[in-house]
Image (cartoon, grey):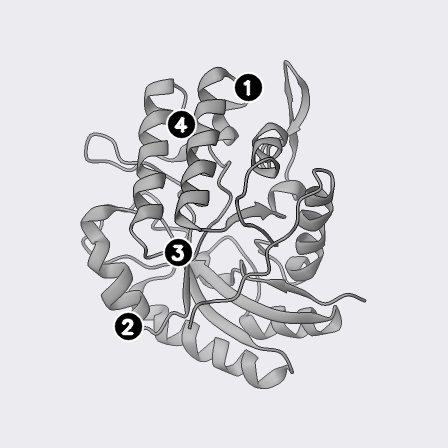
């Protein structure tokens, strides 16, 4: 069996996944993994107005997260890396660098923008229903990409979760994100977990919520670095969803970029 890597893996600490790092690592070893990265949802400071505080670990739980990853490293014969999946808020720029990377020793940070900033709040992508909000989301994603703090952009087409239909504006936003990825030499991710979610009926036919076909048609025609990750929330998915993502990439003739943290 061909060995795969996966750098998008969650744990029970996020509140919507199951299993400890060692559970994912042992399953990955059964399925010929060559490198595994844990990127559970990052904690934010206590004063952060977090709309997602029920789906991420607390700061106080980071030592447990790190110790469980160290336990997993000792149980397998392939490298395991420590990371976090983060949403970008420029007001907390130092948090990503000084706390997540330097204090907690993250070897990589995935940018997974699940919300955008509006009127002092952080509404989720599921409520992006207007072109104005979508453009704000796009600008903030690209701003985070330009920060230089993140190693890849997870599910770059997540905004299609709520937009559903392919329009001139969703196409423009897609092109802007892909062009930024090319310009910044930043990998973008085909997300295997999205392929496990329900499909939706659109005017163009049945579509995955994400990865969204038209987005990846554009990406395939670009010079973007494209990676495939599992976004595992259950140990059994850790390599299987990575295969799903690669199968999806094959539909578009995409050459998969082999990501490794820049440590």
Q: Is residue 127 above or below residue 86?
A: above
Q: Position of residue 139 (x, y in %)?
A: 32, 33
Front: mark 4 or 2: 2
Left or right: 244 in relation to 209: right
Q: Earlier in the sequence, mark 4 or mark 2?
A: 2
For label 1, the SS is loop
Q: Furthest-bottom residue in view?
A: 74
How far apart marks 2 and 1 lie (CA) works out to: 41 Å
In the rendered structure, the answer to whether residue 259 lies left or right of residue 204 reads left
Which residue is denoted by mark 2 in the rendering?
Answer: 102
Residue at numbered disc 3: 56
- Would you place residue 45 above or below residue 63 in this image? above
Q: For the residues marked 3 and 1, what is the alpha-carbon distance in whole angstroms?
A: 30 Å
Q: Nearer the viewer, mark 4 or mark 1?
A: 1
Mark 1 surroundings: few (<14), some (14-19) or many (≥20) residues within 10 A = some
Residue 195 or residue 34, whichever sits in front: 34
**Considering the image in quadrants, where does the N terminus appear?**
bottom right
Q: Name the residue carrying label 4.
A: 127
Q: Residue at x 51, y 17 (%)?
A: 167
* Inter-mark Cα distance, 4 to 1: 14 Å
Asked if labels 3 and 4 touch by Cβ distance under 8 angstroms, the answer is: no
Which of marks 1 and 3 precedes in the sequence? 3
């Amino acid at each position: 069996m061909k060995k795969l890597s996966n750098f998008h893996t969650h744990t029970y600490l996020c509140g919507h996944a199951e299993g400890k790092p060692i559970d994912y690592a042992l399953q990955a070893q059964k399925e010929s993994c060559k490198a595994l990265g844990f990127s559970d949802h990052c904690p934010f400071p206590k004063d952060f107005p977090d709309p997602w505080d029920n789906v991420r670990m607390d700061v106080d739980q980071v030592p447990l997260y790190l110790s469980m990853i160290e336990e997993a490293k000792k149980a397998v014969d392939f490298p395991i890396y420590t990371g976090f999946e983060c949403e970008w808020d420029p007001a907390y720029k130092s948090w990503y660098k000084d706390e997540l990377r330097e204090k907690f020793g993250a070897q990589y940070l995935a940018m997974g923008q699940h919300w955008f900033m509006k009127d002092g709040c952080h509404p989720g992508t599921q409520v992006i229903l207007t072109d104005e909000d979508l453009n704000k989301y796009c600008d903030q994603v690209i701003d985070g990409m330009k920060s230089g703090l993140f190693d890849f952009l997870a599910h770059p087409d997540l905004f299609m979760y709520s937009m559903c239909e392919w329009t001139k504006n969703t196409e423009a936003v897609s092109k802007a994100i892909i062009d930024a990825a090319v310009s910044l030499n930043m990998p973008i991710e085909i997300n295997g977990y999205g392929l496990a979610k329900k499909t939706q009926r659109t005017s163009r036919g049945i579509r995955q919520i994400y990865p969204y076909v038209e987005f990846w048609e554009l990406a395939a025609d670009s010079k973007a670095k494209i990676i495939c990750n599992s976004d595992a929330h259950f140990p059994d998915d850790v390599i299987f969803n990575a295969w799903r993502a690669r199968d999806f990439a094959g539909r578009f003739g995409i050459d998969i970029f082999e990501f490794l943290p820049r440590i």
